[in-house]
Amino acid sequence: MTHAQKLCISILALALLLCATTSNAVAQGKNPYAGDAKVAKLGEFEFRANCAFCHGLGARGGGRGPDLTRTPKKHGDSDAEIFNAINNGVPGTAMPPNGATQQGVGMTEEEIWQVVTYIRSVEKKPGTVSGDAKHGRELFYGNQGCAACHMFDGKGGRLGPDLTGAGTARSTEYLMESMRNPSRRLAQGISEAMKEFSVEYETVDVVTNDGSNYKGTLLNEDSFTIQFVDMREKVHSLDKASLKSWKKSRQSLMPLYDEKALPEKDMQDLLAFLVRGAAGGAK
Amino acid sequence: MKGKLIFALSLITVIAAAAVAQVTPQRLLNAGQEPQNWLMYSGDYSGRRFSSLQEIKVGNAEKLVPKWAYQTMAGGKFETTPLVVDGFMYGTGQDDRVFALDARTGRPIWQYQRALPQDIRPCCGRVNRGLAILGDKVFMGTLDSHVIALDTKTGNVIWDVTAVDYKKGYSFTLAPLVIKNLVLVGISGGEYGIRGFIDAYDVNTGERKWRFYTIPAPGEPGHDSWEGESWKIGGSPAWITGTYDVETNTTFWTTGNPSPSNRGEGRAGDNLYSNSLLALDPDTGKLKWYFQFTQHDEHDYDATQVPVTVNVDGRKLILQANRNGFFYVIDRTTGKLIRAESYAKVSWTKEKDSNGRPVPAKEGSPTPEGNRVCPGAAGATNWMSPTYDPQTKLFYVTAREQCDVFSTAPQPYDAGHAYYGSAYFPNDDAAPFYGALRAIDPDTGKIKWEWKHPSPTWSGVLSTAGGVVFTGDAEGNFIALDAASGKPLWHFQCGASVYSSPMTYAVDGKQYLAVAAGTALFTFGLP
């Protein structure tokens, strides 16, 4: 074989490779089933089997996964971007790559497109949050005291979950429920690799052997130790056996904001701040 | 004098030869009599996962220290129970890795990594739970549905046979079981609409000697327990290692869910032999009797828990804490149920039939909007091994207290694609999930003690003659407990959830414990 022949073959191989890559990218770029109601139904079944665990029935959002009926999507709103979010996961979030949870089977490319088609079929029009985000921001950092325990964009307290991304990661129904009845569903804390269940923001009451009493929120726990942050934002990691007593409760430390404490209009303003702030507005 | 020396030398030779002697069918039969070794998945044919080693005991377990760790550096669940034979350890890792180690130091002798096809899609992780051994071969079932024999000294492939086409959703994840000159395996794939089977292969050639389909074909007894053509894709895999009773020459295997796993529509009937205990003749694969734990299952209640054989007061029993939440005591000579008592929260059944068997309640079926049922889809326990301790006469099992909401998702069957027929997710009521190691008295079905885990775990349990039981938890601890009282004696933080069943062995008279967690196999011993 001459040098020229070798070069030709190399170029041909490269061209084939490019060709293959391109066709793959094209296949992923366009939803072959867009708008097909029958496929959307198949996608609903796939969604239930693979996605509802976090994103809830009807894609309306759950404890871990965002409400997917909302538009635009935070991590890309084109069909191809939604496909890629499902197939490759979303770095920096709890969204795993397709099949990586090791609890189920994972989906084929075709099945992922079915799910994309389904998600499109249940989307609602944007603009469902109508409150005054600027006033919501004032409430958050001011009178309502949210920032005493919650951070938003790096400012605020540490006792409760950071709410920077909550507006896009949770449905408005979930956020409202969290204000009106915070103990109904506790927010999730640390998730460890391969561990099935995340820690939740449970309330901890501890009395040490020297009689010190601490109240706070749970950071982590195993059979022998407990990690928590107390009301003064001090982090503790203690051996359970060394304590005089300790107990956990699913009664959230967050006060219950009923209509009297937080009128409906103010709640809508806070929601607008959380949702639009999370989307990059209302700073 | 010279004669004596020769005698002494030849005695040494005999002893040395014994130390490197190959594993024979006879040694497998008497595996319990050489507790320094761990010759099969559950330790011996009884499935008790009990060791008569007692260097480590209640009085000194608190002094346990790590001895060595072996890293596979592979992601995913590390589910192996390794074998140990005369100082060498043989285990499997994620993605069908196999390793042979010096059991004293953890140093690798050889490693094997199967070249798996790109398009395998095993349910629930690229896992493997272990090997079987006979002569100079270790045997493995692979994720691409082959059965292979590797040379114990080199890891070279001696034979490699295809059991079935993996592209239709079939795979192997279990540790095989060697009986006489046959290696027995059961297939995985209950999430794909397969037709399950148990196979036996000649240990020397890999030739298949028999296959028992876990779903009867037309004309066979039990076939009428399936509606129409549903039997062809009815699942009923057999993905956990069986046990063996030499006295009656019977091997006991268990089967998993009918497919689709969570939707009964289209497969009316009991769906035999899904979720069953099967008594087979190991020489022919002929069925002697069966016992079905959950008829017409709609909650993925696989019966794939090791069927533990125990003799109590002259009665020959099988004990099984089932995924459906009941602890079953069965006469293993007849397959007749003696007792079924719940050992975890149960809501799928409201009554028992005339034989004492819990029967599914209609209102437990999945609905379009979802129906909360206990236990949840992962079950009150799962594949992680239980143990029976002949000293305390207690049965120890990892229990999972978790309920799920089951909703319908009637996917059409498409070969090789997921075929659940339903979805499940944790119920969001305020009751938190948790796990527990429970010590059950087989005489009454009552729980003698429990050790509560903060969250449900996938770790199996080991019992030892030192009066210590060992288990792991989802928080990453490997824990030693007093078998009589459940009092914690010692623990070690492995740094990742335990998804395996521990074992024990000895080298040079020193007892070790081994457990896989995260990417590492850890061993422990006294200082």
Image: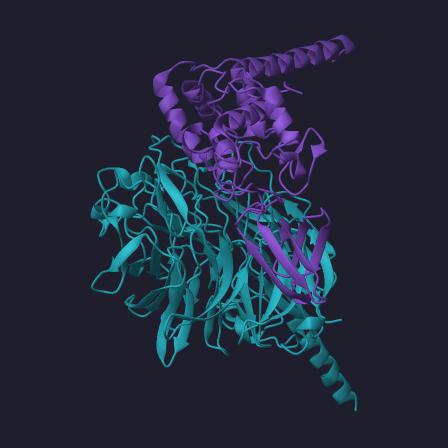
- The residue nearer to you, when weighing B68 against A243, is A243
Between A57 and B288, the one nearer to me in the picture: A57
Q: Quadrant of the N terminus of chain A?
A: top right
Total count of labels:
0
Q: Is residue B168 above or below residue B306?
A: above
The spot of residue B473 in percent (x, y) is: 58, 57
Q: Quadrant of the C terminus of chain A?
A: top right
Q: Residue at x 38, y 50 (%)?
A: B256
Residue that sits furthest to the front in the current view: A260
* Residue A11 sits above or below residue B90 on the image: above
Residue at 49 percent across and 35 percent down: it is A260
Residue B465 image offset from top left, x and y in percent: 57, 76
B57 or B162: nearer the viewer: B57
Name the image quarter holding residue A36: top left
Residue B451 appears in the picture as rendered? yes
Residue projecting furthest to the bottom: B1
Residue B290 coordinates in the image, percent (x, y)? 30, 59
Question: Image check: B456 left or right of A57?
Answer: right
Name the colour assigned to chain A in the rendering. purple
**Residue B295 vertical position relative to residue B490 in the rendered view, above or below:** above
- Residue at the spot x=52%, y=37% of the render? A257
Residue B49 falls left or right of residue B236: right
Residue B270 pos. (x, y %) = 25, 50
Does the image show residue B109?
no
In terms of depth relative to the viewer, which is nearer, B3 or A50? A50
How is the rendered protein coloured? by chain
Quarter holding residue B6: bottom right
Q: Specify the colour of chain B.
A: cyan
